[in-house]
Image (spheres, helix red, strand yellow):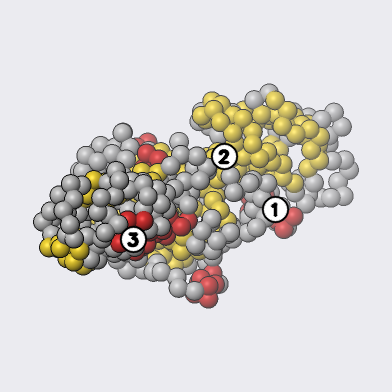
Amino acid sequence: MSPSFPLLFFLSLLSLLSLSLSQPRGILIDCGATVGSTIDGLEWLPDGNFVSSGTPRNLTMPVLVPILSTVRSFPLENNLNRKFCYEVQVFRGAKYLVRTTYFYGGINGRDSPPVFDQIVDGTLWRVVNTTEDYARNMSSYYEGVFLAQGKTMSVCIAANRFTISDPFISALEFVILGDSLYNSTDFGKYGLSLVARHSFGYSGPLIRYPDDQFDRFWEPFDQSDSTVVSNRNISVSGFWNLPPSRIFDTKLTSGQSEALELRWPSWPLPSTMYYIALYFADDRDSSFEGSRVLNISINHVTYFGNLNVTPAGVTVFATQWPLSGLTTITLSPTANSNGGSSINAGEVFEVLALGGRTTTRDVIALETIKNSLQNPPLDWNGDPCLPREYRWTGVTCSEGPRIRVITINLTSMGLVGSLSPSVARLTALTGIWLGNNSLSGSLPDLSSLKILEILHLEDNHFSGEIPSSLGDIGRLQELFLQNNNFTGQIPSNLIGKSGLNIQTSGNDFLIPSPSPGIN
């Protein structure tokens, strides 16, 4: 269940910092929009410079939130396991709040929105299912915390086996978080996916920016026994998660010496590990005799004992806590507590094991190859190999902790362009199939591909001489070059090469001497 909610390319640090003077530091993208806008003091950018596929669409139904009036949709075309990615420049090593927003608006002509996956870099983040929210005429948002492990970060929309119409997205946000936020998590290994964030005892609109400097959404969570506390002056600088001070204006509370039992989150959770943070502040003056002291349990397991709730506020957290199904939080005053139980706010995130990343040199090489093609495959965005069910069309990758590209097969893809010399940087390649396309230009030096066994370039428009460096590839077994525009002589170190099947018909070659291994 998801929470509900009723750029241009930044070329320098200076431009990002100047924007941050009036809003949280980061990039807010209005998906499907063709012009930028300012909404509630926040600057939103059109998405054209961040995504290379999909179609901008305008909703025909009225919306209250302007960013929901457009979406970008992506073609299903009976093609499962294809991802479409937004690529955003980020600061390597920075921690980002990433938020996606969805409002269907009937753009596919169906009553219900599609179900699909969303991906961050090489990690499968969440299944997007907005059906319940849309039935209530509400949008859905998903929020996570991830470390930027490179100079770019990708967020991808991907069809899965449940997707029956075009996936879509309404908005995408990247906000840089302070170093102290959620810092007990090893973000080199894990990400956090928001499950719930609530201000208890509160019944108003979302608490967000400017009350929360990072524009986190604190949803209302009210009960009849809530208490409103006015004129609070709590400094949040002592809380490393830096919650907004407004969450301490309200609380859920019990009577004197009574326990408080809270069903939160209010929906069942899948069995896995969760990050849980609970926030407390005593609304009484510090001179009040005695302290409010609580024992906290979750699903009848002790979470924290003898918590002294002070007027300055306190938080307790667990980096990895197992939860499954419905969750009950019980707050019980200790025998020496002066006052009943109370709680102001809480956050719970699912802890995601990161899926890893393709080796950087291979990613850079493939990006250069992509740029040398006039019409690369539509899904050549994001991580080339991960998640594995969403690897790039025509690309296969190795197993294990170091992910390398091991084959490229783009046969009969209608490709136009040239073969970039960067292909020689893919040193784990064992096979290249580029036959039956319209590729042209000369062949680069491939001698660095020491374990290459198969090279198929037949039925293209390659020209020039065949590099003699191909003869230096000791494991080469198949070299298919027929029906191109190669000229000159076949290099002597290829003629009669043991174990090599070389096909060269349909070119203008001068063969030095007949050889039974050449056709």
The residues bearing labels 3 and 1 have C-alpha atoms spaced at a distance of 58 Å
Relative depth, front residue between 161 and 421: 421
Q: Residue furthest top?
A: 300
The residues bearing labels 2 and 3 have C-alpha atoms spaced at a distance of 49 Å
The residues bearing labels 1 and 2 have C-alpha atoms spaced at a distance of 19 Å
- Residue matched to label 2: 351
Assess disc 3: are there few (<14), some (14-19) or many (≥20) residues with their C-alpha within 10 Å of its C-alpha. Answer: some
- Residue at left offset 49%, top offset 74%: 12
Which quarter of the picture shows residue 211? bottom right
Left of 313 or right of it: where is 9? left
Q: Pointer 1 and pointer 2: residues touching (CB < 8 Å)? A: no
- Residue at left offset 58%, top offset 59%: 93
Assess disc 1: are there few (<14), some (14-19) or many (≥20) residues with their C-alpha within 10 Å of its C-alpha. Answer: some
Identify residue type, mark 3.
Ser
- Residue at left offset 46%, top offset 57%: 361
Relative depth, front residue between 34 and 329: 34
Query: In the rendering, at what x and y percent does residue 30 appear?
Result: 37, 60
- Residue at left offset 78%, top offset 42%: 309
Under tag 3, what secondary structure? helix
Relative depth, front residue between 245 and 480: 480
